């Protein structure tokens, strides 16, 4: 299938229009027209090879909402015309213990990422949602619930599930006390989801600059981490902290905020952290944990939850031709809080 997208062909070059072929449909494949694609900070990292493993050309995009246009001979879950979504992965081994219990993101053989990865069957490079069309294994396509705004839902496929999964893993509900470090693309979704689950939510920020935004999103309070007295007064006040900071940072100031058996979950930074002290861990039986995205079943659960509770990210719609400017703004954290590309802007 011939299609058009936007690709990075080198770490030093801007994204540009790119013509390429999608694979022919296998029996269990779904072909879709991409309607909307979210812009994730990971897209920027991959385009610029910040992590050192990009395979050019890179067609980014793993927050994808579209419409089914064709189905393989053995597809049973979807029909032409259905609205579907694709997140950060498009395949996994399907037979290891993790895959069998619905944790495909933790596949023992490694899941196949939506872009900048190798197809498990033919070894071709996977290309993401900054394109007009996508072909995906049926099991990794998600059903868009009725009532969920398609134009705003795309970031749920990464930012949404990345924050929903630890909230579910640590059983957040009414009476839970949740802290969120960082009020960006991930952080604002953590706030909305935790609030919808009935938790008491605290945003932890270096200044009061985002206090009005935080309160408007539904938080109960903003805690200024640079205010030593306020931090001391908030000791042992949280059961769970979702740390969304995407760069190397020091977690030590936040650990005393956790109550006994509390957990700080890292969902933002991929790579080294400043050295943590074991004192608050030992003295409070506290934990530092990490969490990636969720599995397919949990991602579907998240979409259904968001439809029921009317939880959607705050989005700014852009045309694909504006993606390089969006990347520059993303690097400056100049977005409240996610960019979404209207793929209708990509002319055939």
Image: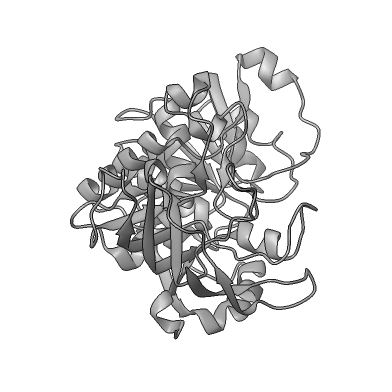
Measured from the top left, where is residue 227 in percent x and y? 64, 47
The residue sitting at 46% across, 50% down in the picture is: 87
Q: Is residue 142 left or right of residue 148?
A: right
Instruction: Say if 220 sits above or below 102 in the image.
Output: below
| Residue in the foreground of this view, choosing between 245 and 143 | 143
Measured from the top left, where is residue 115 in percent x and y? 59, 55
Q: Say whether residue 187 is visible.
A: yes
Instruction: Say if 11 sits above or below 199 in the image.
Output: below
Q: Is residue 81 left or right of residue 184?
A: left
Q: Is residue 76 left or right of residue 258?
A: left
The residue sitting at 49% across, 32% down in the picture is: 104
Q: Quadrant of residue 260?
A: top right
Instruction: Say if 168 sits above or below 37 in the image.
Output: above
Instruction: Say if 38 sits above or below 30 in the image.
Output: below
The residue sitting at 69% across, 59% down in the picture is: 46
Colour option used: one colour
The residue sitting at 32% across, 30% down in the picture is: 173
Measured from the top left, where is residue 29 in percent x and y? 40, 50
Measured from the top left, where is residue 167 in percent x and y? 43, 34
Q: Say whether residue 234 is visible.
A: no
Image quadrant holding the C terminus, namely bottom left
| Residue in the foreground of this view, choosing between 211 and 311 | 311
Counting labels gives: 0
């Amino acid at each position: 299938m011939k299609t058009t997208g936007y690709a990075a062909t080198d770490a030093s070059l801007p994204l540009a229009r790119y013509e390429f072929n999608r694979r022919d449909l296998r029996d269990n494949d779904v072909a879709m027209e991409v309607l909307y694609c979210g812009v994730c900070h990971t897209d920027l990292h991959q385009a610029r090879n910040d992590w050192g493993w990009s395979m050019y050309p890179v067609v980014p995009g793993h927050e994808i909402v579209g419409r089914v246009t064709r189905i393989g001979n053995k597809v049973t879950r979807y029909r032409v015309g259905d609205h579907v979504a694709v997140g950060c992965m498009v395949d996994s081994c399907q037979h290891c213990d993790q895959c069998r219990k619905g944790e495909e993101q933790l596949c023992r053989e490694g899941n196949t990422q939506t872009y900048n990865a190798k197809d498990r069957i033919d070894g071709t490079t996977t290309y993401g949602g900054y394109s007009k069309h996508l072909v995906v294994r049926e099991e990794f396509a998600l059903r868009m619930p009725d009532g969920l705004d398609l134009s705003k839902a795309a970031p749920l496929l990464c930012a949404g599930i990345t924050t929903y999964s630890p909230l579910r893993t640590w059983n957040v509900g009414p009476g839970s006390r949740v802290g969120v470090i960082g009020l960006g693309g991930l952080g604002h979704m953590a706030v909305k989801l935790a609030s919808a689950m009935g938790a008491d939510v605290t945003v932890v920020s270096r200044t009061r600059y985002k206090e009005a935004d935080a309160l408007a999103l539904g938080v109960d309070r903003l805690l200024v981490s640079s205010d030593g007295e306020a931090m001391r007064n908030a000791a042992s006040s949280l059961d769970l902290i979702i740390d969304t900071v995407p760069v190397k940072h020091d977690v030590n100031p936040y650990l005393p905020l956790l109550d006994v058996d509390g957990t700080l979950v890292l969902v933002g930074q991929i790579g080294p952290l400043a050295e943590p002290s074991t004192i608050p861990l030992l003295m409070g039986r506290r934990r530092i944990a990490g969490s990636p995205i969720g599995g397919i079943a949990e991602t579907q659960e998240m979409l259904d939850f968001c439809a029921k509770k009317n939880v959607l990210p705050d989005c700014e719609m852009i045309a694909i031709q504006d993606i390089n400017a969006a990347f520059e703004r993303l690097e400056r954290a100049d977005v409240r809080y996610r960019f979404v590309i209207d793929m209708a802007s990509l002319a055939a």
